[in-house]
Amino acid sequence: MTRAAPPAPPPALSPSLRILLVLASSVIVLAGVYFARELVGPLALAIVLVVICEPVRRPFERRGWPRWTGTTAVILLAYLVLLVMGLLLWVAGVQFAQLVADYLDKLRGSLDDLLAWAQSVGLDQEARDAAAEGLDPQTILGFVSRLGGTAVAILTALFFVVSYIIFTAADAARYRDAERVFGRGRRPVLARIGRLNTGIRRYYVVNASFGAVVAIIDGLALWALGVPAPIVWAVLAFVTNFIPNIGFVLGLIPPAVLAFVVGGWPLLLAVIAIYCVVNVVLQVLVQPKFVSDAVDLSLTLSFFSVIFWTFVIGPLGAILSIPLTLFVRALVLEGDPGALWLRWLSGDRTATPAAAAREYLPHP
């Protein structure tokens, strides 16, 4: 009896068709993330917090203590980080709302002076109307009051983050046994996950360090210039430092507007000059280099990731842009030997032919 011939393997896809399939799949996945961003954003934040706090587990493991003690320490530290950041934002928001109410009359006077100047330089009526509408004190007060309407959404997101932290911290303890359970064959995958976690921790250590320096210098400078509530603007400078590249602008606008209200053009220009010297030098020129070296991402990709992830999952995407980009690169590119060129373009300094040969060789 003759044996049936084995079925012929399916024809290989052409490179162009593979690229189209990858692009189509990426669009579908990103569309799903976009529509589920209210769930995905808190989950991503919880995972990042657990990754940052994970090293606190090691002393408990070295002492041979039960696993739940290390997990509890990770959860408590993550909650502490979340609580401190939340308190900083709450204090800054409350004081900012109070400042707007206190300086309402001066803001109206500054608005009138600005409109008079616009008319003197020949700006047309439409431009002046747009400026009046955007700078109208009632409009600003209405914006501040509408911030209270987001309390329910924020509390809902915090509930998810708090819950996710518990689950991810417990799972992280179990995942540490992966190599023992599955053997050395999974070592390359575990090595990529280890590099991803290390990159995330390095990124936030660098950002927190530079953010603290920038916040202290900005706060002292604003205090010396007599700008009201310098501590609020120092807190804002620290928080916005976690937004790559454009965080400097977001942290500058509120104190600059307030400086114009209380001190006119000279104080406004002084605040802008100080922020440009301090923040541009540290945040725009020095810090991106340290961040790029810490996470192996190109400066161009770091800047683009802020815009991209903010569009996909909202404001939280600006803070999580670098970790999310590192995750996508590890998931999509680092397991594919044919993506070495793309990894190198993204800023990965380990993506060289010699390093790739060692990475993709089978492990005994």
Image: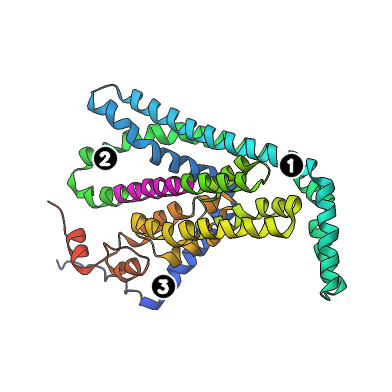
How many numbered discs?
A: 3
Q: Residues within 10 Å of mark 2 (few under 14, many from 20)?
A: few
Left of 260 or right of it: where is 351?
left
- Residue drawn at x 22%, y 48% is 187
The residue where tag 2 is placed is 178
The residue where tag 3 is placed is 19
* Numbered range of the magenta stretch: 194-211
Regarding mark 3 in the picture, which secondary structure is present there?
helix
Nearer the N terminus, badge 3 or badge 1?
3
197 within the magenta span: yes
270 within the magenta span: no
Q: Residues within 10 Å of mark 1 (few under 14, many from 20)?
A: some
User: What amino acid type is highlighted by mark number 1?
Assistant: Leu
The residue where tag 1 is placed is 99
> Is mark 3 in CB contact (under 8 Å) with mark 2?
no
Camera sees residue 40 = no
C-alpha separation, residue under disc 3 versus residue under disc 2:
32 Å
